[in-house]
Amino acid sequence: MSIYEFEGRLPKIGREVYIHPSADVIGLVTLGDGCFVGPGARIRGDYGEIIIGRGTSIEDNCVVHARPGDVTRIGDHVTIGHGCVIHNATIHDWAVIGMGSVVSDWAVVGEWSVVGEGGVVKQRQEIPAGQIGVGVPAKIIGSVNEEYKRVWTEFKETYIDLATRYPKGLKPVK
């Protein structure tokens, strides 16, 4: 794994966090316990700050960054799908950001909200708690129900489990 201090800005990594060897964590970044950071992900706290809560998965090829002096906050048990860009935004607990989505500057994604695959949450836009936003720019199309929460709670546990299994089970093939 590639964890870097940058100009005195040192990452803080919680317990049972998995960071893939091809992922980078740079500077003022906090990763809560049980996080999973997939291959190719880049989490850059080089001139902004990144705070990521417990049990959150930052999947393959994601970019998480913040503006100078600002903070990107990602809550507990959040799923950031493959290939997402999260820039200077706030994403609350239990949210799901679908593959290939962008959440831009000062945007807010509420607790248990969903951004559908390829969606764009533009600057200063908000997806309220429990709502589903899709498209470019994201538009609300419905609400998250209890069955969705049950299923996604199980999916989120899969990545928490992978964070403990990868260090023991991932082996290079020669």
Image (cartoon, helix red, strand yellow):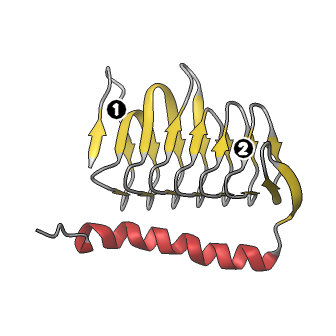
Q: Secondary structure at mark 2?
A: strand
Picture coordinates of residue 167 (x, y %)?
Answer: 26, 66
160 sits to left or right of 115: left
The percent coordinates of residue 67 (x first, y second) are 57, 24
Which tag is nearer the camera, tag 2 or tag 1? 2
Q: Quadrant of residue 7?
A: top left
* Relative side of 128 to 28, left or right: right
Specify the quadrant that holds the C terminus: bottom left
Q: Viewer-proximal residue, 115 or 32?
A: 115
- For label 2, count other residues whose C-alpha is less than 10 Å away and answer few (under 14), some (14-19) or many (20+): many
Name the mark on residue 79. Answer: none
In which image quadrant can residue 144 be found?
bottom right
Residue where numbered disc 1 is placed = 10
Number of numbered callouts drawn = 2
Badge 1: few (under 14), some or many (20 or more) residues near its Cα, within 10 Å?
some
Q: Which mark is residue 120?
A: 2
